[in-house]
Image (cartoon, rainbow, N blue to C red):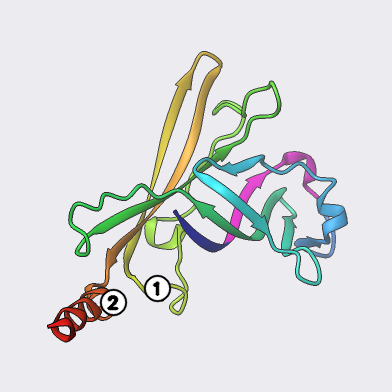
Amino acid sequence: EYTIDVFFRQKWKDERLKFKGPMNILRLNNLMASKIWTPDTFFHNGKKSVAHNMTMPNKLLRIQDDGTLLYTMRLTVQAECPMHLEDFPMDAHSCPLKFGSCKYGDGDAYTTSEVTYIWTYNASDSVQVAPDGSRLNQYDLLGQSIGKETIKSSTGEYTVMTAHFHLKRKIGYFVIQTYLPCIMTVILSQ
């Protein structure tokens, strides 16, 4: 598993929220934002997620005059990452972050006919990593890729979006932390 801190942005159009006025964009506070429909997005492979509320909720909702909404929230997500350790410590992994529509109680998630998830930009722009945000002790972040799949069930088709983070283990870390101490222990014990 891994933990990632993200600014999660969603954009959609709601024709009911078109307006004419002196401003092109309205910025809503959290109280007003709670009264507007937002997608029920959740992380399929998430074990735990936390929305940041330091001093106030870290959420921003903007409405453009044509009814386009941009909803940004800061989250920390703990997600599953299946790892194959056959090549340890020279292994590489692709850790997915999967998200899509959520299920309500006994009801189903929004189908693709109701809500369609798409990446706004290409792979390098849809998922951006801060230059200082990819410093990991044990791994190098080689890059990221995006994908989309449609899951079919008896109740309809559902979209699942996936961002993959490609990691390669730093061998130097294990030489210093594991191999060198073991070698020194063997040498000193003789």
Q: In the image, residue 164 lies at what x, y percent?
A: 38, 53
Residue found 18% across the figure and 56% down from its top: 87
**Range of the magenta residues?**
7-19
Disc 2 target residue = 173
Dot 2, how many residues are within 10 Å of its Cα: few (below 14), some (14-19), or many (20+)?
A: some
Marks 2 and 1, Cα distance to the nearest angstrom? 11 Å
Residue 177 included in the magenta stretch of the image: no
**In the rendered view of the protein, which quadrant contains the C terminus?**
bottom left
Tag 1: amino acid: Leu
Outermost residue toward the front? 190
Q: Amino acid at mark 2?
A: Tyr
Q: Position of residue 80 (x, y in %)?
A: 45, 48
Find disc 1 in the rendering and name its residue. 136
Query: Which sits earlier in the primary sequence, circle 2 or circle 1?
Result: 1
Picture residue at 85% right of the left edge, 59% below the top: 21
Foreground of the two, 163 or 12: 163
> Which label sits in the foreground, 2 or 1?
2
- Give me the residue at 82% from left, 49% from top: 34
**Residue 13 point in image, percent of width and height:** 66, 44
